Image: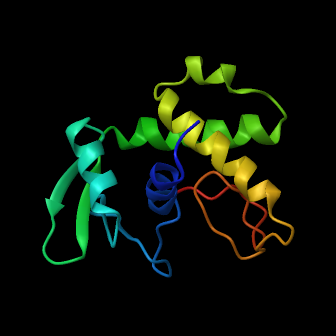
Amino acid sequence: MISKKVRELFVSLMEASDNSVVFYDVETEQYRGFFNRAVVNKYIDLGALELVDGKGDEITILLNNRDDFLSSFASGIREAANGNDQSYADYNANPFAFSVGFEHFHQMAKKKRPNVDYICHGFERADTGLIHQQ
């Protein structure tokens, strides 16, 4: 099981958009926002993230191997939605990202009132009926 703080960090990256707390720059592939520094530093040390700028409280980071992360995160969501278990994580380029997506799907499914305006990579958008791609 992935800790809540770790899941929150990576989910905030997958929720990044022009209208969210975390901003994603398509041209530079950088994420900018206010993150838990201890968690960010841990994943920088592990090689999953790269610090671009950390002045003040706002942090700008890169997600290393971003394409693999996005693909595996979306796979985790898809498999959870299909009722499968996490054994499929072993078949993904990034088993960690798969598990984050898988657990995030289940956290969202527990909510009594789903947010119809929710936008996150790998989730179906209510306004278009399509899977959101970052």
- Residue 104 in picture, x, y percent from top left: 64, 50
Q: Is residue 122 above or below residue 90?
A: below
Image point 15% across, 59% down: which residue? Answer: 52
Q: Is residue 62 above or below residue 85?
A: below
Q: Is residue 117 above or below residue 125?
A: below
- Residue 64 in picture, x, y percent from top left: 29, 42
Quarter-of-image position of residue 33: bottom left
| Front residue of 99 and 128 | 99
Quarter-of-image position of residue 44: top left
Q: Is residue 28 visible?
A: no
Quarter-of-image position of residue 111: bottom right
| Front residue of 28 and 84 | 84
Q: Is residue 118 above or below residue 79?
A: below
Q: Is residue 106 visible?
A: yes
- Residue 29 in picture, x, y percent from top left: 30, 58
Image point 50% across, 58% down: which residue? Answer: 8
Q: Going by the picture, which residue comes out furthest to the bottom?
A: 19
Image point 50% across, 82% down: which residue? Answer: 19
Query: Is 125 on the left-hand or right-hand side of 96?
Result: right
